[in-house]
Image (spheres, coloured by chain):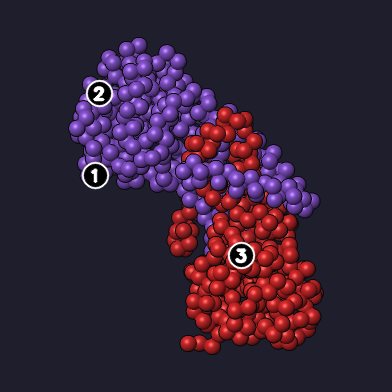
Chain colours: A purple, B red
Amino acid sequence: MAEPVFARLALIGVGLIGSSIARRARATGDLAGEIVACAKTPATRERIRELGLADRIAADPKAAVEGADGVILCAPVGTYAEIAAAIAPHLAPGAIVSDVGSTKQSVIRDIAPHLPPKVHFVPAHPLAGTEHSGPDAGFATLFEGRWTILTPPEGSDPAAVARVGEFWRRCGAMVETMEAGHHDRVLAIVSHLPHLIAFTICGTADDLADESRSQVLKFAASGFRDFTRIAASDPVMWRDVFINNREALLEMLARFMEDAQAMARAVRWADGAYIEDKVKRGRKIRQSLIDLNQA
Amino acid sequence: MAEPVFARLALIGVGLIGSSIARRARATGDLAGEIVACAKTPATRERIRELGLADRIAADPKAAVEGADGVILCAPVGTYAEIAAAIAPHLAPGAIVSDVGSTKQSVIRDIAPHLPPKVHFVPAHPLAGTEHSGPDAGFATLFEGRWTILTPPEGSDPAAVARVGEFWRRCGAMVETMEAGHHDRVLAIVSHLPHLIAFTICGTADDLADESRSQVLKFAASGFRDFTRIAASDPVMWRDVFINNREALLEMLARFMEDAQAMARAVRWADGAYIEDKVKRGRKIRQSLIDLNQA
Protein backbone atom coordinates (compact mmCIF):
# COMPACT_ATOMS: atom_id res chain seq x y z
CA MET A 1 0.00 0.00 0.00
CA ALA A 2 1.10 3.55 -0.70
CA GLU A 3 2.51 5.60 2.16
CA PRO A 4 -0.29 7.76 3.65
CA VAL A 5 -0.36 11.33 2.30
CA PHE A 6 -0.25 12.68 5.86
CA ALA A 7 1.29 10.99 8.89
CA ARG A 8 -1.14 12.82 11.17
CA LEU A 9 -4.23 14.51 9.75
CA ALA A 10 -6.25 16.95 11.84
CA LEU A 11 -9.85 17.51 10.73
CA ILE A 12 -11.30 20.71 12.19
CA GLY A 13 -15.05 20.13 11.97
CA VAL A 14 -16.61 16.72 11.35
CA GLY A 15 -19.88 17.19 9.44
CA LEU A 16 -20.86 15.71 6.09
CA ILE A 17 -17.49 16.49 4.44
CA GLY A 18 -15.19 15.99 7.43
CA SER A 19 -16.74 12.66 8.36
CA SER A 20 -16.60 11.50 4.73
CA ILE A 21 -12.86 12.24 4.66
CA ALA A 22 -12.44 10.37 7.96
CA ARG A 23 -14.43 7.38 6.68
CA ARG A 24 -12.40 7.32 3.46
CA ALA A 25 -9.14 7.54 5.42
CA ARG A 26 -10.28 4.70 7.70
CA ALA A 27 -11.34 2.59 4.73
CA THR A 28 -8.26 2.98 2.56
CA GLY A 29 -5.40 3.67 4.96
CA ASP A 30 -3.50 5.67 2.33
CA LEU A 31 -4.71 9.13 3.31
CA ALA A 32 -3.58 9.47 6.92
CA GLY A 33 -1.50 7.44 9.36
CA GLU A 34 -3.46 8.92 12.23
CA ILE A 35 -6.65 10.99 12.36
CA VAL A 36 -7.31 13.69 14.92
CA ALA A 37 -10.90 14.96 14.85
CA CYS A 38 -11.88 18.28 16.35
CA ALA A 39 -15.53 19.11 17.07
CA LYS A 40 -16.99 21.99 19.03
CA THR A 41 -19.97 20.30 20.63
CA PRO A 42 -19.80 17.40 23.10
CA ALA A 43 -22.61 15.62 21.22
CA THR A 44 -20.61 15.59 17.97
CA ARG A 45 -17.47 14.41 19.75
CA GLU A 46 -19.44 11.58 21.35
CA ARG A 47 -20.87 10.63 17.94
CA ILE A 48 -17.36 10.63 16.38
CA ARG A 49 -16.28 8.29 19.15
CA GLU A 50 -19.26 5.97 18.62
CA LEU A 51 -18.68 5.91 14.86
CA GLY A 52 -14.97 5.25 15.37
CA LEU A 53 -14.03 8.01 12.94
CA ALA A 54 -10.76 9.13 14.59
CA ASP A 55 -7.76 8.01 16.60
CA ARG A 56 -7.96 11.06 18.80
CA ILE A 57 -10.78 13.50 19.44
CA ALA A 58 -10.21 17.08 20.51
CA ALA A 59 -12.49 19.88 21.66
CA ASP A 60 -9.91 22.57 21.00
CA PRO A 61 -8.47 23.19 17.51
CA LYS A 62 -5.17 24.25 19.09
CA ALA A 63 -4.69 20.82 20.65
CA ALA A 64 -5.93 19.08 17.49
CA VAL A 65 -3.26 20.52 15.19
CA GLU A 66 -0.25 19.85 17.45
CA GLY A 67 2.18 17.63 15.56
CA ALA A 68 -0.10 17.27 12.52
CA ASP A 69 1.52 17.48 9.08
CA GLY A 70 -1.93 17.92 7.49
CA VAL A 71 -4.76 20.14 8.74
CA ILE A 72 -8.09 20.40 6.90
CA LEU A 73 -10.71 22.91 7.99
CA CYS A 74 -14.15 21.35 7.45
CA ALA A 75 -16.30 23.84 9.37
CA PRO A 76 -18.57 26.54 7.86
CA VAL A 77 -16.39 29.17 6.11
CA GLY A 78 -17.59 31.90 8.50
CA THR A 79 -15.54 30.26 11.28
CA TYR A 80 -12.24 30.08 9.38
CA ALA A 81 -10.67 33.39 10.47
CA GLU A 82 -11.15 32.58 14.13
CA ILE A 83 -9.90 29.01 13.74
CA ALA A 84 -6.84 30.13 11.75
CA ALA A 85 -5.92 32.73 14.38
CA ALA A 86 -6.29 30.11 17.13
CA ILE A 87 -4.28 27.31 15.52
CA ALA A 88 -1.53 29.39 13.86
CA PRO A 89 0.93 29.39 16.83
CA HIS A 90 0.48 25.63 17.25
CA LEU A 91 1.07 24.49 13.67
CA ALA A 92 4.10 22.29 13.04
CA PRO A 93 6.74 23.72 10.66
CA GLY A 94 6.17 22.34 7.16
CA ALA A 95 2.54 21.44 7.92
CA ILE A 96 0.00 21.86 5.15
CA VAL A 97 -3.22 23.70 5.97
CA SER A 98 -6.14 23.12 3.62
CA ASP A 99 -9.93 23.44 3.76
CA VAL A 100 -13.11 22.36 1.99
CA GLY A 101 -14.96 25.69 1.85
CA SER A 102 -17.26 26.66 -1.04
CA THR A 103 -15.88 30.22 -1.30
CA LYS A 104 -12.18 30.58 -2.00
CA GLN A 105 -11.36 34.31 -2.04
CA SER A 106 -12.83 34.69 1.44
CA VAL A 107 -10.97 31.63 2.67
CA ILE A 108 -7.65 33.05 1.48
CA ARG A 109 -8.55 36.43 2.98
CA ASP A 110 -9.45 34.84 6.35
CA ILE A 111 -6.72 32.22 6.72
CA ALA A 112 -3.55 33.28 4.89
CA PRO A 113 -2.66 36.33 7.04
CA HIS A 114 -2.60 34.23 10.21
CA LEU A 115 -0.29 31.45 9.04
CA PRO A 116 3.41 31.38 9.96
CA PRO A 117 5.87 31.45 7.02
CA LYS A 118 6.90 27.79 7.33
CA VAL A 119 3.36 26.50 6.95
CA HIS A 120 1.89 25.79 3.49
CA PHE A 121 -1.63 26.85 2.61
CA VAL A 122 -3.51 25.04 -0.17
CA PRO A 123 -7.23 25.97 -0.32
CA ALA A 124 -9.43 23.23 -1.76
CA HIS A 125 -13.10 22.74 -2.56
CA PRO A 126 -14.55 19.28 -3.17
CA LEU A 127 -17.69 19.73 -5.34
CA ALA A 128 -19.60 17.04 -3.54
CA GLY A 129 -22.34 16.94 -0.99
CA THR A 130 -25.84 15.87 -0.22
CA GLU A 131 -28.72 17.67 1.45
CA HIS A 132 -27.82 15.96 4.72
CA SER A 133 -25.39 17.23 7.34
CA GLY A 134 -23.59 16.15 10.49
CA PRO A 135 -21.12 13.32 11.25
CA ASP A 136 -23.71 10.63 10.46
CA ALA A 137 -24.31 11.98 6.94
CA GLY A 138 -20.84 11.23 5.55
CA PHE A 139 -19.76 8.24 3.48
CA ALA A 140 -16.41 7.07 2.12
CA THR A 141 -17.38 7.31 -1.56
CA LEU A 142 -18.80 10.86 -1.45
CA PHE A 143 -15.96 12.33 -3.53
CA GLU A 144 -15.68 9.59 -6.15
CA GLY A 145 -15.89 10.88 -9.69
CA ARG A 146 -16.51 14.44 -8.47
CA TRP A 147 -14.24 17.44 -8.97
CA THR A 148 -12.09 18.95 -6.30
CA ILE A 149 -10.84 22.43 -7.15
CA LEU A 150 -7.57 23.70 -5.68
CA THR A 151 -7.01 27.47 -5.57
CA PRO A 152 -3.40 27.92 -4.37
CA PRO A 153 -2.42 31.58 -3.98
CA GLU A 154 0.42 32.81 -6.20
CA GLY A 155 3.81 31.65 -4.96
CA SER A 156 2.48 28.48 -3.29
CA ASP A 157 4.92 25.61 -2.83
CA PRO A 158 4.35 23.24 -5.78
CA ALA A 159 5.15 20.19 -3.63
CA ALA A 160 2.45 21.13 -1.11
CA VAL A 161 -0.09 21.71 -3.90
CA ALA A 162 0.81 18.34 -5.44
CA ARG A 163 0.38 16.63 -2.08
CA VAL A 164 -3.11 18.04 -1.55
CA GLY A 165 -3.96 17.09 -5.14
CA GLU A 166 -2.78 13.54 -4.44
CA PHE A 167 -4.88 13.48 -1.27
CA TRP A 168 -8.05 14.27 -3.22
CA ARG A 169 -7.22 11.90 -6.07
CA ARG A 170 -6.93 9.15 -3.46
CA CYS A 171 -10.38 10.22 -2.23
CA GLY A 172 -11.57 9.33 -5.72
CA ALA A 173 -11.90 12.92 -6.95
CA MET A 174 -10.79 14.55 -10.20
CA VAL A 175 -8.55 17.50 -9.38
CA GLU A 176 -8.41 20.89 -11.11
CA THR A 177 -6.48 24.03 -10.19
CA MET A 178 -7.75 27.56 -10.80
CA GLU A 179 -7.55 31.10 -9.54
CA ALA A 180 -9.72 31.75 -6.46
CA GLY A 181 -11.71 34.61 -8.00
CA HIS A 182 -12.54 32.53 -11.04
CA HIS A 183 -13.62 29.66 -8.79
CA ASP A 184 -15.97 31.98 -6.93
CA ARG A 185 -17.66 33.22 -10.12
CA VAL A 186 -18.14 29.73 -11.54
CA LEU A 187 -19.48 28.39 -8.25
CA ALA A 188 -21.79 31.38 -7.89
CA ILE A 189 -23.68 30.32 -11.01
CA VAL A 190 -23.46 26.51 -10.76
CA SER A 191 -24.17 26.17 -7.06
CA HIS A 192 -24.66 29.27 -4.91
CA LEU A 193 -27.32 30.96 -7.05
CA PRO A 194 -29.34 27.73 -7.55
CA HIS A 195 -29.34 27.24 -3.79
CA LEU A 196 -30.36 30.85 -3.12
CA ILE A 197 -33.22 30.45 -5.60
CA ALA A 198 -34.34 27.14 -4.09
CA PHE A 199 -34.38 28.58 -0.57
CA THR A 200 -36.30 31.60 -1.83
CA ILE A 201 -39.01 29.73 -3.71
CA CYS A 202 -39.62 27.49 -0.70
CA GLY A 203 -40.20 30.64 1.33
CA THR A 204 -42.47 32.09 -1.36
CA ALA A 205 -44.60 28.94 -1.23
CA ASP A 206 -44.58 28.93 2.57
CA ASP A 207 -45.96 32.49 2.56
CA LEU A 208 -49.07 31.53 0.59
CA ALA A 209 -52.41 31.56 2.35
CA ASP A 210 -53.07 28.47 4.43
CA GLU A 211 -55.28 26.56 2.03
CA SER A 212 -52.92 27.00 -0.92
CA ARG A 213 -49.90 26.14 1.20
CA SER A 214 -51.28 22.79 2.26
CA GLN A 215 -52.09 22.03 -1.35
CA VAL A 216 -48.59 23.06 -2.41
CA LEU A 217 -47.29 20.26 -0.22
CA LYS A 218 -49.93 17.85 -1.42
CA PHE A 219 -49.44 18.44 -5.10
CA ALA A 220 -45.72 19.20 -5.20
CA ALA A 221 -45.03 18.13 -8.75
CA SER A 222 -41.54 17.18 -9.75
CA GLY A 223 -40.49 20.77 -10.35
CA PHE A 224 -41.03 21.91 -6.81
CA ARG A 225 -39.82 18.65 -5.27
CA ASP A 226 -36.41 19.07 -6.86
CA PHE A 227 -36.21 22.58 -5.43
CA THR A 228 -36.97 21.39 -1.92
CA ARG A 229 -34.24 18.77 -2.20
CA ILE A 230 -31.72 21.48 -3.02
CA ALA A 231 -33.17 23.63 -0.28
CA ALA A 232 -32.83 21.02 2.45
CA SER A 233 -29.23 21.96 3.20
CA ASP A 234 -27.35 23.18 6.23
CA PRO A 235 -28.49 26.72 7.21
CA VAL A 236 -25.22 27.89 8.80
CA MET A 237 -23.06 26.57 5.97
CA TRP A 238 -25.13 28.33 3.34
CA ARG A 239 -25.47 31.55 5.31
CA ASP A 240 -21.66 31.68 5.40
CA VAL A 241 -21.29 30.79 1.72
CA PHE A 242 -23.69 33.53 0.58
CA ILE A 243 -22.10 36.21 2.72
CA ASN A 244 -18.56 35.16 1.79
CA ASN A 245 -19.19 35.04 -1.95
CA ARG A 246 -21.27 38.19 -1.90
CA GLU A 247 -19.91 39.98 -4.96
CA ALA A 248 -20.06 37.08 -7.41
CA LEU A 249 -23.39 35.86 -6.06
CA LEU A 250 -25.03 39.28 -6.30
CA GLU A 251 -23.73 39.71 -9.83
CA MET A 252 -25.12 36.35 -10.95
CA LEU A 253 -28.39 37.00 -9.13
CA ALA A 254 -28.71 40.38 -10.87
CA ARG A 255 -28.16 38.74 -14.26
CA PHE A 256 -30.72 36.07 -13.41
CA MET A 257 -33.28 38.66 -12.25
CA GLU A 258 -32.91 40.59 -15.51
CA ASP A 259 -33.46 37.37 -17.44
CA ALA A 260 -36.46 36.43 -15.29
CA GLN A 261 -37.98 39.87 -15.87
CA ALA A 262 -37.51 39.42 -19.61
CA MET A 263 -39.25 36.05 -19.33
CA ALA A 264 -42.10 37.62 -17.33
CA ARG A 265 -42.52 40.20 -20.07
CA ALA A 266 -42.62 37.46 -22.72
CA VAL A 267 -45.30 35.62 -20.75
CA ARG A 268 -47.34 38.80 -20.28
CA TRP A 269 -47.24 39.63 -24.01
CA ALA A 270 -47.59 35.98 -25.09
CA ASP A 271 -44.25 36.09 -26.94
CA GLY A 272 -44.23 32.37 -27.76
CA ALA A 273 -41.06 32.47 -29.84
CA TYR A 274 -39.05 34.01 -27.00
CA ILE A 275 -40.29 31.45 -24.45
CA GLU A 276 -39.69 28.54 -26.79
CA ASP A 277 -36.16 29.74 -27.45
CA LYS A 278 -35.38 29.87 -23.72
CA VAL A 279 -36.74 26.36 -23.14
CA LYS A 280 -34.67 25.10 -26.05
CA ARG A 281 -31.54 26.61 -24.51
CA GLY A 282 -32.25 24.73 -21.28
CA ARG A 283 -32.48 21.52 -23.29
CA LYS A 284 -29.24 22.30 -25.08
CA ILE A 285 -27.37 22.88 -21.83
CA ARG A 286 -28.83 19.67 -20.44
CA GLN A 287 -27.59 17.81 -23.50
CA SER A 288 -24.11 19.32 -23.13
CA LEU A 289 -24.04 18.12 -19.54
CA ILE A 290 -25.02 14.62 -20.59
CA ASP A 291 -22.35 14.70 -23.27
CA LEU A 292 -19.83 15.64 -20.58
CA ASN A 293 -21.00 12.69 -18.47
CA GLN A 294 -21.95 15.01 -15.69
CA ALA A 295 -25.67 14.27 -15.72
CA MET B 1 -61.80 -8.28 -15.41
CA ALA B 2 -63.75 -5.06 -15.01
CA GLU B 3 -65.59 -3.67 -18.03
CA PRO B 4 -63.36 -1.07 -19.77
CA VAL B 5 -64.16 2.53 -18.75
CA PHE B 6 -64.57 3.46 -22.42
CA ALA B 7 -65.65 1.19 -25.25
CA ARG B 8 -63.71 3.31 -27.72
CA LEU B 9 -61.12 5.81 -26.51
CA ALA B 10 -59.72 8.47 -28.86
CA LEU B 11 -56.36 9.97 -27.87
CA ILE B 12 -55.72 13.26 -29.65
CA GLY B 13 -51.96 13.62 -29.44
CA VAL B 14 -49.60 10.78 -28.53
CA GLY B 15 -46.57 12.18 -26.72
CA LEU B 16 -45.30 11.30 -23.25
CA ILE B 17 -48.75 11.41 -21.63
CA GLY B 18 -50.85 10.08 -24.53
CA SER B 19 -48.53 7.15 -25.17
CA SER B 20 -48.41 6.35 -21.44
CA ILE B 21 -52.23 6.18 -21.39
CA ALA B 22 -52.15 3.96 -24.48
CA ARG B 23 -49.52 1.67 -22.95
CA ARG B 24 -51.50 1.41 -19.72
CA ALA B 25 -54.70 0.67 -21.65
CA ARG B 26 -52.90 -2.04 -23.66
CA ALA B 27 -51.38 -3.55 -20.52
CA THR B 28 -54.48 -3.68 -18.34
CA GLY B 29 -57.41 -3.93 -20.75
CA ASP B 30 -59.75 -2.19 -18.29
CA LEU B 31 -59.41 1.35 -19.61
CA ALA B 32 -60.56 1.07 -23.22
CA GLY B 33 -62.09 -1.60 -25.42
CA GLU B 34 -60.52 0.01 -28.46
CA ILE B 35 -57.91 2.74 -28.83
CA VAL B 36 -57.89 5.29 -31.64
CA ALA B 37 -54.73 7.36 -31.75
CA CYS B 38 -54.54 10.66 -33.58
CA ALA B 39 -51.19 12.27 -34.42
CA LYS B 40 -50.46 15.21 -36.67
CA THR B 41 -47.14 14.14 -38.16
CA PRO B 42 -46.59 11.07 -40.35
CA ALA B 43 -43.47 10.21 -38.34
CA THR B 44 -45.40 10.00 -35.08
CA ARG B 45 -48.18 7.95 -36.69
CA GLU B 46 -45.58 5.54 -38.04
CA ARG B 47 -43.99 5.27 -34.60
CA ILE B 48 -47.40 4.57 -32.97
CA ARG B 49 -47.87 1.78 -35.48
CA GLU B 50 -44.42 0.33 -34.80
CA LEU B 51 -44.99 0.47 -31.04
CA GLY B 52 -48.44 -1.10 -31.40
CA LEU B 53 -50.03 1.58 -29.24
CA ALA B 54 -53.44 1.74 -30.94
CA ASP B 55 -56.08 -0.27 -32.77
CA ARG B 56 -56.61 2.53 -35.26
CA ILE B 57 -54.44 5.49 -36.19
CA ALA B 58 -55.84 8.72 -37.59
CA ALA B 59 -54.28 11.84 -39.03
CA ASP B 60 -57.44 13.90 -38.59
CA PRO B 61 -59.01 14.48 -35.14
CA LYS B 62 -62.46 14.57 -36.78
CA ALA B 63 -62.09 11.00 -37.98
CA ALA B 64 -60.50 9.89 -34.70
CA VAL B 65 -63.45 10.87 -32.51
CA GLU B 66 -66.20 9.29 -34.64
CA GLY B 67 -68.04 6.76 -32.50
CA ALA B 68 -65.77 7.23 -29.48
CA ASP B 69 -67.41 7.38 -26.03
CA GLY B 70 -64.19 8.78 -24.57
CA VAL B 71 -61.95 11.48 -26.07
CA ILE B 72 -58.80 12.70 -24.31
CA LEU B 73 -56.85 15.65 -25.68
CA CYS B 74 -53.14 15.01 -25.04
CA ALA B 75 -51.64 17.76 -27.21
CA PRO B 76 -50.09 21.06 -26.00
CA VAL B 77 -52.84 23.24 -24.48
CA GLY B 78 -52.32 25.93 -27.14
CA THR B 79 -53.90 23.60 -29.72
CA TYR B 80 -57.08 22.80 -27.76
CA ALA B 81 -59.39 25.52 -29.12
CA GLU B 82 -58.70 24.50 -32.70
CA ILE B 83 -59.06 20.80 -31.96
CA ALA B 84 -62.31 21.35 -30.04
CA ALA B 85 -63.80 23.37 -32.90
CA ALA B 86 -62.79 20.68 -35.39
CA ILE B 87 -64.07 17.64 -33.48
CA ALA B 88 -67.27 19.15 -32.00
CA PRO B 89 -69.63 18.28 -34.90
CA HIS B 90 -68.29 14.72 -34.99
CA LEU B 91 -68.62 13.81 -31.29
CA ALA B 92 -71.05 11.03 -30.41
CA PRO B 93 -73.96 12.02 -28.15
CA GLY B 94 -73.10 11.16 -24.54
CA ALA B 95 -69.37 11.07 -25.27
CA ILE B 96 -67.01 12.34 -22.57
CA VAL B 97 -64.32 14.80 -23.62
CA SER B 98 -61.37 15.18 -21.28
CA ASP B 99 -57.78 16.37 -21.51
CA VAL B 100 -54.43 16.26 -19.69
CA GLY B 101 -53.44 19.94 -19.89
CA SER B 102 -51.47 21.70 -17.14
CA THR B 103 -53.66 24.84 -17.21
CA LYS B 104 -57.34 24.35 -16.47
CA GLN B 105 -59.04 27.75 -16.77
CA SER B 106 -57.67 28.16 -20.30
CA VAL B 107 -58.72 24.65 -21.21
CA ILE B 108 -62.31 25.32 -20.11
CA ARG B 109 -62.23 28.67 -21.95
CA ASP B 110 -60.94 27.03 -25.14
CA ILE B 111 -62.95 23.80 -25.23
CA ALA B 112 -66.32 24.26 -23.47
CA PRO B 113 -67.89 26.79 -25.87
CA HIS B 114 -67.40 24.43 -28.83
CA LEU B 115 -68.99 21.31 -27.37
CA PRO B 116 -72.56 20.26 -28.22
CA PRO B 117 -74.98 20.02 -25.26
CA LYS B 118 -75.13 16.21 -25.19
CA VAL B 119 -71.36 15.84 -24.77
CA HIS B 120 -69.80 15.84 -21.27
CA PHE B 121 -66.64 17.79 -20.57
CA VAL B 122 -64.41 16.75 -17.64
CA PRO B 123 -61.04 18.57 -17.64
CA ALA B 124 -58.24 16.58 -15.97
CA HIS B 125 -54.57 17.07 -15.19
CA PRO B 126 -52.34 14.13 -14.28
CA LEU B 127 -49.42 15.51 -12.22
CA ALA B 128 -46.92 13.20 -13.77
CA GLY B 129 -44.21 13.54 -16.35
CA THR B 130 -40.55 13.24 -17.08
CA GLU B 131 -38.15 15.51 -18.93
CA HIS B 132 -38.59 13.33 -22.04
CA SER B 133 -41.24 13.75 -24.71
CA GLY B 134 -42.72 11.97 -27.73
CA PRO B 135 -44.40 8.56 -28.18
CA ASP B 136 -41.26 6.66 -27.18
CA ALA B 137 -41.03 8.43 -23.83
CA GLY B 138 -44.24 7.02 -22.32
CA PHE B 139 -44.58 4.06 -19.95
CA ALA B 140 -47.56 2.26 -18.42
CA THR B 141 -46.70 3.08 -14.79
CA LEU B 142 -46.19 6.84 -15.27
CA PHE B 143 -49.32 7.77 -13.29
CA GLU B 144 -48.94 5.31 -10.41
CA GLY B 145 -49.07 6.94 -7.01
CA ARG B 146 -49.32 10.41 -8.58
CA TRP B 147 -52.24 12.82 -8.33
CA THR B 148 -54.68 13.51 -11.12
CA ILE B 149 -56.72 16.64 -10.57
CA LEU B 150 -60.20 16.97 -12.10
CA THR B 151 -61.66 20.46 -12.55
CA PRO B 152 -65.24 19.91 -13.73
CA PRO B 153 -67.07 23.20 -14.45
CA GLU B 154 -70.14 23.90 -12.32
CA GLY B 155 -73.15 21.85 -13.39
CA SER B 156 -71.08 18.96 -14.78
CA ASP B 157 -72.76 15.55 -14.94
CA PRO B 158 -71.65 13.68 -11.79
CA ALA B 159 -71.68 10.34 -13.61
CA ALA B 160 -69.26 11.64 -16.25
CA VAL B 161 -66.96 13.08 -13.57
CA ALA B 162 -67.04 9.76 -11.71
CA ARG B 163 -66.18 7.89 -14.89
CA VAL B 164 -63.14 10.04 -15.60
CA GLY B 165 -62.11 9.66 -11.95
CA GLU B 166 -62.39 5.88 -12.30
CA PHE B 167 -60.32 6.02 -15.48
CA TRP B 168 -57.45 7.72 -13.66
CA ARG B 169 -57.71 5.51 -10.60
CA ARG B 170 -57.31 2.54 -12.93
CA CYS B 171 -54.22 4.27 -14.30
CA GLY B 172 -52.87 4.03 -10.75
CA ALA B 173 -53.43 7.69 -9.88
CA MET B 174 -54.91 9.31 -6.78
CA VAL B 175 -57.79 11.55 -7.86
CA GLU B 176 -58.76 14.95 -6.46
CA THR B 177 -61.37 17.45 -7.63
CA MET B 178 -60.98 21.22 -7.38
CA GLU B 179 -62.03 24.48 -8.95
CA ALA B 180 -60.06 25.34 -12.12
CA GLY B 181 -58.82 28.72 -10.88
CA HIS B 182 -57.55 27.20 -7.66
CA HIS B 183 -55.79 24.48 -9.65
CA ASP B 184 -54.05 27.10 -11.76
CA ARG B 185 -52.73 29.00 -8.74
CA VAL B 186 -51.45 25.87 -7.00
CA LEU B 187 -49.79 24.59 -10.16
CA ALA B 188 -48.26 28.00 -10.83
CA ILE B 189 -46.19 27.73 -7.65
CA VAL B 190 -45.50 23.98 -7.53
CA SER B 191 -44.70 23.47 -11.19
CA HIS B 192 -44.92 26.38 -13.63
CA LEU B 193 -42.77 28.85 -11.70
CA PRO B 194 -40.05 26.26 -10.91
CA HIS B 195 -39.89 25.44 -14.61
CA LEU B 196 -39.76 29.10 -15.63
CA ILE B 197 -36.92 29.63 -13.15
CA ALA B 198 -35.03 26.57 -14.36
CA PHE B 199 -35.28 27.64 -18.01
CA THR B 200 -34.16 31.13 -17.05
CA ILE B 201 -31.09 30.16 -15.04
CA CYS B 202 -29.93 27.86 -17.83
CA GLY B 203 -30.12 30.86 -20.15
CA THR B 204 -28.28 33.06 -17.65
CA ALA B 205 -25.45 30.51 -17.50
CA ASP B 206 -25.42 30.14 -21.27
CA ASP B 207 -24.94 33.91 -21.62
CA LEU B 208 -21.71 33.92 -19.62
CA ALA B 209 -18.45 34.56 -21.42
CA ASP B 210 -17.04 31.52 -23.16
CA GLU B 211 -14.47 30.44 -20.61
CA SER B 212 -16.90 30.58 -17.70
CA ARG B 213 -19.60 28.84 -19.70
CA SER B 214 -17.45 25.84 -20.46
CA GLN B 215 -16.53 25.64 -16.78
CA VAL B 216 -20.18 25.88 -15.81
CA LEU B 217 -20.73 22.67 -17.71
CA LYS B 218 -17.60 21.09 -16.31
CA PHE B 219 -18.27 21.89 -12.69
CA ALA B 220 -22.06 21.73 -12.65
CA ALA B 221 -22.55 20.88 -8.99
CA SER B 222 -25.72 19.20 -7.90
CA GLY B 223 -27.61 22.48 -7.60
CA PHE B 224 -27.30 23.37 -11.25
CA ARG B 225 -27.67 19.79 -12.45
CA ASP B 226 -31.11 19.54 -10.86
CA PHE B 227 -32.12 22.74 -12.62
CA THR B 228 -31.06 21.44 -16.02
CA ARG B 229 -33.07 18.27 -15.44
CA ILE B 230 -36.18 20.36 -14.86
CA ALA B 231 -35.27 22.54 -17.81
CA ALA B 232 -34.94 19.65 -20.27
CA SER B 233 -38.64 19.64 -21.07
CA ASP B 234 -40.75 20.09 -24.17
CA PRO B 235 -40.49 23.68 -25.50
CA VAL B 236 -43.93 23.87 -27.15
CA MET B 237 -45.74 22.36 -24.20
CA TRP B 238 -44.15 24.80 -21.77
CA ARG B 239 -44.61 27.80 -24.04
CA ASP B 240 -48.34 27.01 -24.08
CA VAL B 241 -48.51 26.40 -20.31
CA PHE B 242 -46.86 29.71 -19.49
CA ILE B 243 -49.02 31.72 -21.85
CA ASN B 244 -52.22 29.96 -20.78
CA ASN B 245 -51.61 30.35 -17.05
CA ARG B 246 -50.34 33.89 -17.43
CA GLU B 247 -52.12 35.60 -14.52
CA ALA B 248 -51.32 33.05 -11.82
CA LEU B 249 -47.77 32.54 -13.10
CA LEU B 250 -47.00 36.26 -13.20
CA GLU B 251 -48.40 36.70 -9.71
CA MET B 252 -46.27 33.89 -8.29
CA LEU B 253 -43.23 35.15 -10.21
CA ALA B 254 -43.75 38.66 -8.80
CA ARG B 255 -43.93 37.25 -5.26
CA PHE B 256 -40.79 35.21 -5.89
CA MET B 257 -38.91 38.22 -7.31
CA GLU B 258 -39.78 40.30 -4.24
CA ASP B 259 -38.49 37.50 -2.03
CA ALA B 260 -35.32 37.11 -4.11
CA GLN B 261 -34.68 40.87 -3.88
CA ALA B 262 -35.07 40.66 -0.11
CA MET B 263 -32.58 37.80 -0.08
CA ALA B 264 -30.17 39.82 -2.25
CA ARG B 265 -30.41 42.67 0.22
CA ALA B 266 -29.69 40.30 3.12
CA VAL B 267 -26.61 38.99 1.30
CA ARG B 268 -25.39 42.50 0.51
CA TRP B 269 -25.73 43.61 4.15
CA ALA B 270 -24.55 40.28 5.57
CA ASP B 271 -27.82 39.76 7.44
CA GLY B 272 -26.98 36.23 8.58
CA ALA B 273 -30.11 35.75 10.71
CA TYR B 274 -32.38 36.50 7.74
CA ILE B 275 -30.53 34.09 5.44
CA GLU B 276 -30.44 31.34 8.05
CA ASP B 277 -34.17 31.72 8.63
CA LYS B 278 -34.90 31.31 4.92
CA VAL B 279 -32.74 28.20 4.65
CA LYS B 280 -34.48 26.75 7.70
CA ARG B 281 -37.86 27.31 6.06
CA GLY B 282 -36.68 25.39 3.01
CA ARG B 283 -35.70 22.52 5.29
CA LYS B 284 -39.05 22.65 7.06
CA ILE B 285 -40.96 22.45 3.79
CA ARG B 286 -38.76 19.59 2.69
CA GLN B 287 -39.55 17.77 5.92
CA SER B 288 -43.28 18.35 5.46
CA LEU B 289 -43.00 16.85 1.99
CA ILE B 290 -41.21 13.80 3.34
CA ASP B 291 -43.87 13.47 6.04
CA LEU B 292 -46.49 13.53 3.30
CA ASN B 293 -44.64 10.78 1.45
CA GLN B 294 -44.24 13.00 -1.56
CA ALA B 295 -40.46 13.17 -1.53
> Residue B148: percent from the left, percent from the top?
58, 70
> Residue placed farthest to the top in the image?
A117
Q: Residue at x 51, y 81 (%)?
A: B29
Compute the Cα span from label 3 to label 1. Answer: 50 Å
Residue shown at the point (57%, 79%) measured from the top left: B167
For label 3, the crowd category at 10 Å Cα-Cα, with few meaning under 14, some 14 to 19 and many 20 or more, is many
Q: Label 3's element? A: loop
Q: Quadrant of residue B79?
A: bottom right
Image-quadrant location for residue A160:
top left
Question: Badge 2 is on which residue?
Answer: A68
Q: In the rendered image, which residue does mark 1 sit on?
A: A51
Tag 3 subunit: B
Q: What residue do we see at 24% from left, 44% from top?
A: A51
Disc 1 chain ID? A
- Tag on residue B15? 3
**Circle 2 residues within 10 Å: few <14, some 14–19, many ≥20:** many
User: Relative to A275, is A25 on the left or the right?
Assistant: left
- Pick whichever of labels 2 and 1 is earlier in the sequence: 1
The one of B5 and B267 positioned closer to us in this rendering: B5
Q: How many marks?
A: 3
Chain letter of disc 2 in the image:
A
**Circle 2 sits in a helix, a strand or a loop, which is it?**
loop
